[in-house]
Image: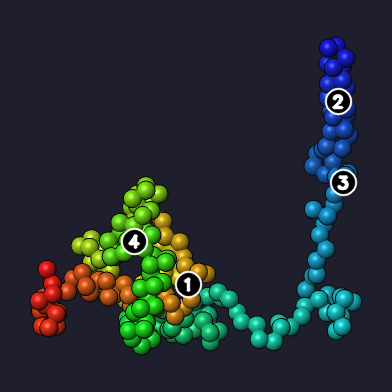
Amino acid sequence: MRYFFAFLLGVALLALTVFGIAGRRGTDFRKPPLEIFNDMVRQAKLRPQVPNSFFADGRSSQHLVAGTVAQRIGDQGNDTWQGTAQNTGMVPGTTNFVATIPVPVTTALLDRGRERYNISCLPCHGATGDGNGITKKIGAMAVVAPLVDAAGKNAIIIPDGQVFRIISDGKAPNMQGYAANIEINDRWAIVAYVRALQRARFATLDEVPAAERATLK
């Protein structure tokens, strides 16, 4: 047993010796630190505006590849792709949300919106938009914003562009943004379907076609 403790003592003394000689280099002492694996500190890189023999033109800074599309420069950037109402939900050149959906609302769009809603929105907001999705039922999220009940009725008066932005960027504290998961046209399809859910929830009997009123309970 005493040999084991002697071994541990030797290891400890060796560690203290190494630390005493090299451990404080570069911090408390002027000598540079000893770098065993210096690739973690000094990685190969290209500095802009300096010569570089790797490229044929001898420059480090290269032009973008033809066809490159800017990603997330900013909602109101100068880039044409980013500056349209359909892609941003904003009135071009302003900070105002578009009031209505900038794409034609068709049956096909609503069908697509229902499909995408059921995939991305239903787990939290529920099939009818009442905020009672599975995440709330199992306790994963205690509070989910309703889209169609009395507490969520104000959602009807916010502009369609704002609904689009919420889908895209999320909303604190619990909702993440879905811009990376849902295509732009599908986000507008979801906006249209959410409006349909709201209209169905708050519509009056007079708004129902006479031929269909008899089927209502």
Name the residue that disc number 2 marks.
Answer: 11
Question: Gap between marks 4 and 2, in whole Å?
Answer: 60 Å
Instruction: Give the mark, 1 or 3, whose residue is nearer the N terminus.
Output: 3
Instruction: Give the mark, 1 or 2, whose residue is nearer the N terminus.
Output: 2
Type of amino acid at the residue the image marks with label 3: Ile
User: Which mark is in front, 1 or 2?
Assistant: 1
Name the residue that disc number 1 marks.
Answer: 182
Question: Gap between marks 3 and 2, in whole Å?
Answer: 20 Å
- Specify the label residue 125 is tagged with: 4
Q: Is residue 80 found left or right of 216 in the rendered image? A: right
Instruction: Give the mark, 3 or 2, whose residue is nearer the N terminus.
Output: 2
Question: Gap between marks 4 and 1, in whole Å?
Answer: 17 Å
| Residue sticking out furthest to the top | 2
* Residue 110 locus on image (x, y percent): 34, 79
Q: Coloured how?
A: rainbow
- Neighbour tally class for label 1: few under 14, some 14-19, many 20 plus, Cα within 10 Å: some
Type of amino acid at the residue the image marks with label 1: Ile
Q: Residue at x 32, y 61 (%)?
A: 126
In the picture, the quarter occupied by the C terminus is: bottom left
Instruction: Give the mark, 4 or 1, whose residue is nearer the N terminus.
Output: 4
Type of amino acid at the residue the image marks with label 2: Val
Q: Is residue 52 found left or right of 136 in the rendered image? A: right
- Neighbour tally class for label 4: few under 14, some 14-19, many 20 plus, Cα within 10 Å: many
Name the residue that disc number 3 marks.
Answer: 36
Question: Gap between marks 1 and 2, in whole Å?
Answer: 57 Å
Q: Where 36 sits versus 207, above or below? A: above
